[in-house]
Amino acid sequence: MARSKFAGGKTGTGVLRRLWPAERELFKEHLLRLDAVTRRERFGTAVNDAFLENYAMTTFGVGGLVYAYVEDDVVRGAAELRGLDDIVAQTGEAAFSVEAGWRRRGIGADLLGRLITAARNRGIRTLYMTFLPGNTAMRRLAAKFEADLVGGYADVEGVIATGGPTPFTILDEALDNATGFATLALSIQRRFWPTTLLARALRA
Ligand SMILES: CC(C)(COP(=O)(O)OP(=O)(O)OC[C@H]1O[C@@H](n2cnc3c(N)ncnc32)[C@H](O)[C@@H]1OP(=O)(O)O)[C@@H](O)C(=O)NCCC(=O)NCCS
């Protein structure tokens, strides 16, 4: 199975980490920046801003999990895992979007690696990815992770057998989450500092 080029979570000046519900605005802004072609590749059809705004609001509900590549407090790539609420089926669905200027740096591969680990740790044995037949990038990315590709006329389905959880996959995710919390706390602090300084200056 493919290993990420960015093991350790860093690529460029950004970081790959879990995105939390409090950060859904960052996810929404990322989706809204996607051009028409990318939107079609990601959602299988043309979608407008209103659809994406609504989609971003529902993504962090029960059964959803998001990993993101975050650079300067801006989300440039995201991977979603859905279906966690269906414990019986033990299947999940993954979907990806990396902004055009950030592609071919290994972000997509790293995001898929994180999702596979997260899926394993939650008892998901089969991970599905659906994409358009002409989507070479996604086809190759899925193949890198030894996905079985089932071709259809309208779309292609990539199927990855994830395997069960191990102490290593659990530790891996725990470390990831610790990084995620720490960087979330830092970015909140950064956003609040200027306001706090201003308030102090006004009181003095
Ligand atoms: C698919 C997508 C997520 C890949 O993201 P990425 O960050 O560019 O992917 P990576 O840099 O990790 O590339 C991983 C592998 O995918 C393949 N790949 C990626 N882009 C490719 C391209 N344009 N042409 C051919 N192969 C490509 C390569 O095999 C690559 O490995 P390599 O660089 O070692 O050769 C990105 O192209 C994207 O957001 N596309 C639009 C949305 C979409 O199609 N989503 C999928 C539907 S769920």
Image (spheres, rainbow, N blue to C red):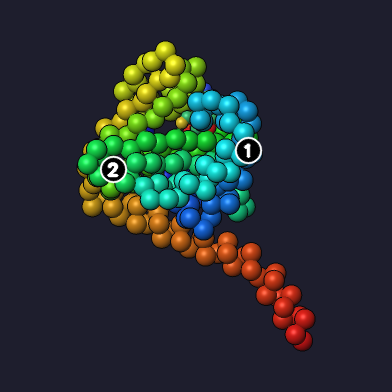
x then y, percent, for residue 67: 45, 46
In the rendered image, residue 144, in percent from the top left (x then y), is placed at 38, 27
- Name the kind of residue labelled 2 in the image: Asp
Picture coordinates of residue 13, whole percent (x, y): 58, 49
Circle 1 residue: 49
How many labels sit on residues? 2
Q: Judge whether residue 3 can be spotted in this image.
A: no
Asked if disc 1 is less than 8 Å from ligand 1, the answer is: no
Q: Residues within 10 Å of mark 1 (few under 14, many from 20)?
A: few
Which residue is at 48% across, 63% downward? 182
- Determine whether 104 is above or below 29 in the image: above
Crowd around label 2: few <14 · some 14–19 · many ≥20 (10 Å) = few
Residue 148, located in which quarter of the rendered image?
A: top left
The amino acid type found where label 1 is placed reads: Asp
The answer to whether residue 19 is seen in the rendering is yes
Q: Secondary structure at mark 2?
A: loop
Task: Check residue 97 in the rendering and tell me which mark sits there, or answer none.
Answer: none
* Foreground of the two, 141 or 106: 141
Q: Earlier in the sequence, mark 2 or mark 1?
A: 1
Give the distance between the C-alpha atoms of the residues marked 2 and 1, in whole angstroms.
Answer: 29 Å
Confirm or reject: label 2 Cβ below 8 Å from ligand 1: no
Specify whether 119 is left or right of 200: left
Looking at the picture, does residue 86 appear above or below residue 196? above
Horizontal side, residue 4 vs residue 57: left or right: left
Residue drawn at the location 36% of the way across and 47% of the way down: 63
Q: Quadrant of the C terminus?
A: bottom right
Identify the residue shown where x is 58% and y is 50%: 26
Q: Which mark is residue 86?
A: 2
Q: Could you tell me residue 78's position as x and y percent?
A: 50, 42
